[in-house]
Image (cartoon, coloured by chain):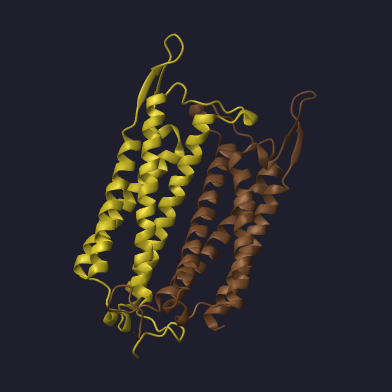
Chain colours: A yellow, B brown
Amino acid sequence: MGVIGRKEAFLRVFATVFLVLTACLVGFDTQTKILFYSVVRKATYRDLNALFVLVWIDSAAAAYNLLQLFRCYLWPVSKEDLTSNYKYLAWGFYLLDQAAVYIVFAANSAAVQASMFAVTGESSLQWMKLCNRFTRFCTQTGVALLCGYFASIFMAVISSISAYNLFRFYSPNQFLLLKGK
Amino acid sequence: MGVIGRKEAFLRVFATVFLVLTACLVGFDTQTKILFYSVVRKATYRDLNALFVLVWIDSAAAAYNLLQLFRCYLWPVSKEDLTSNYKYLAWGFYLLDQAAVYIVFAANSAAVQASMFAVTGESSLQWMKLCNRFTRFCTQTGVALLCGYFASIFMAVISSISAYNLFRFYSPNQFLLLKGK
């Protein structure tokens, strides 16, 4: 396990921590308020579909990063793998890393967009804002989404390392030909 | 300009076309309806902030891809560049390509999330749906967002090619050392 392997492992740990943090902060975020007279309203992440999806996607991404962390230790991609039948597995890991970061980033951005409506409302469509009443709930969600962006940045760097790990074995002169062949 | 250069150029043309298509479909999408008695309501992309942002981001990304297309023809990254002071420029293009695809993908996902509220509403928050009245407007926006995802996929492949173009020059054994040094 070289210098790259250790860097990748550290980044995956950070990404996992931030993903779990995001999922927990959103998932356990509740606030109960008495609105008018005796109408009790409880705000949870289930009120916004985007937050619900975010919790599940971030949990799945955290599990994926943990699995990849073990893979880093047990089986770092080497040049021998790329000349053998393991080539498709190495490409598979690269594509999975790319897909994971895009999905997490998209889910986070969608959740930010949905939360923006809750903060500002949309007067032209008569959607009323809610964060003036559920302040603590909205603050916690905001912190969670910030953590989600940190996790996305870590995963973007991981996907670059993943690309480096794969493409450095290829020849600089001929298309998709391995080096030293 | 090798096989990779030509592939990249084609992909950039496709990405630009789809980005322009998305921006135009969203930007020129209007529908006027008489709601009650004589209340005339005109739906445009300015009603949803996410669509407004999407038009500008997609236009900027299309312009960026066009510029990169010219760059592909005039100055393909070679090994000589990476050993000279142009190294930082080559890394800059790689990072710009990565940033571009993430920004376009996030803007598109946020717009999809915002449009989902317009289609389904959110009963728990008393946000009413609007697409039952502005059907043609919503259909056109849907098609535009689909084009936006196609553009994102093209740009994701371009960013992979960009990674390949950069990392294949590096040594497979030592960290960030150029090959054949």
Residue in the picture at 60% in, 64% down: B65
Q: Is residue A140 above or below residue B91?
A: above
Say if residue A57 shows up in the picture: no
Viewport quadrant of the N terminus of chain A = bottom left
Q: Residue furthest front?
A: B85
Residue in the picture at 31% in, 47% down: A18
Q: Quadrant of residue A13?
A: bottom left
Residue in the picture at 74% in, 28% down: B35
Q: Is residue A144 above or below residue A57?
A: above
Q: Is residue A33 above or below residue A87?
A: above
Residue in the picture at 34% in, 61% down: A158
In percent of width and height, residue B32 lies at 76, 37
Q: Is residue A97 above or below residue A32?
A: below
| In-front residue for pair A9/B88 | B88
Describe residue A15's horizontal placement relative to residue B71 as left or right. left
Q: Residue furthest top?
A: A37
In percent of width and height, residue B49 lies at 60, 39
In percent of width and height, residue B40 lies at 77, 29
Viewport quadrant of the C terminus of chain A = bottom left
Q: Residue furthest bottom?
A: A181
Describe residue A155's horizontal placement relative to residue B32 as left or right. left
